[in-house]
Amino acid sequence: MEFLYSTKNIVLRDLDTVYEALFLRTVTGFEVFIEEHFIAIVSGREKLGKRRVSVRMNATSAGALMDILLQGDAYMTWLPFAKTEKRAQIYLKDGKPFSELSDGDRSMIRSITIIRNAIAHRSSHAAQEFSRVVIGSQHLLPTEKTPAGFLRSQVRTGPTRNRFEIYAGELARIAMALC
């Protein structure tokens, strides 16, 4: 897509849309992973070792378990990650493994959630949070101060990568840490 943009085969708006869509798909995939992993642990389908994870309740059926977890809602919300941690504290002893993330991982998920909200909601509040928390006092070009521009921007560490690649890699690493 970057090549298509550089050769003027697509316009910037299209490139931005691709980055935003890929980011939303990546974050949604992470949320799906959290939900499936959580349900597998609580249902007993996934064992992480008795010392590490202990379920605080037993449901008689998969349907009953889902009724209990949903608590009358149509779906469960996993981000902001504090919602996941709160749910884990209720159903898992000490909230493990969801309570074991480092503060750095929690901060990374918070930034990713704020970027997702700025893309998905397009509200003034979401834009202000993106500016305040994600952009902060970083010295960026004006084109890098939008969610898509920020995700496209290059980071000069090791092999040059853009922020989208870094965030996608961090979500994958955090998912592995939860297993």
Image (cartoon, rainbow, N blue to C red):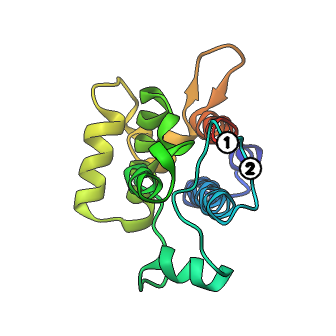
Q: Amino acid at mark 2?
A: Lys
Image coordinates of residue 179 in percent, x first then y, are 70, 42
- Quadrant of res 58: bottom right
Image coordinates of residue 110 in percent, x first then y, are 40, 43
Residue lying furthest top: 158
Q: Residue at x 62, y 33 (%)?
A: 166
Q: Amino acid at mark 1?
A: Lys
Asked if residue 98 is positioned above or below residue 30 in the image, the reply reads above
Q: Nearer the viewer, residue 69 or 27?
A: 69
Q: Nearer the viewer, residue 51 or 142?
A: 51
Badge 1 element: loop
Q: Is residue 159 left or right of residue 141?
A: right
Q: Residue at x 60, y 75 (%)?
A: 59
Badge 2 element: loop
Q: Nearer the viewer, residue 61 or 70?
A: 61
Q: Is residue 75 visible?
A: no
Q: Residue at x 38, y 50 (%)?
A: 82
Asked if residue 126 is positioned above or below residue 104 in the image, the reply reads below
Mark 1 touches mark 2? (CB < 8 Å)? yes
Q: Residue at x 57, y 23 (%)?
A: 155
Q: Is residue 96 visible?
A: yes
- Quadrant of res 94: top left
Cα gap from disc 1 to disc 2, whole angstroms: 8 Å
Q: Is residue 109 left or right of residue 169?
A: left
Q: Tag on residue 50?
A: 1
Residue that label 2 marks: 47
Image coordinates of residue 77 in percent, x first then y, are 45, 67
Q: Tag on residue 88?
A: none
- Tell me how many marks there are: 2
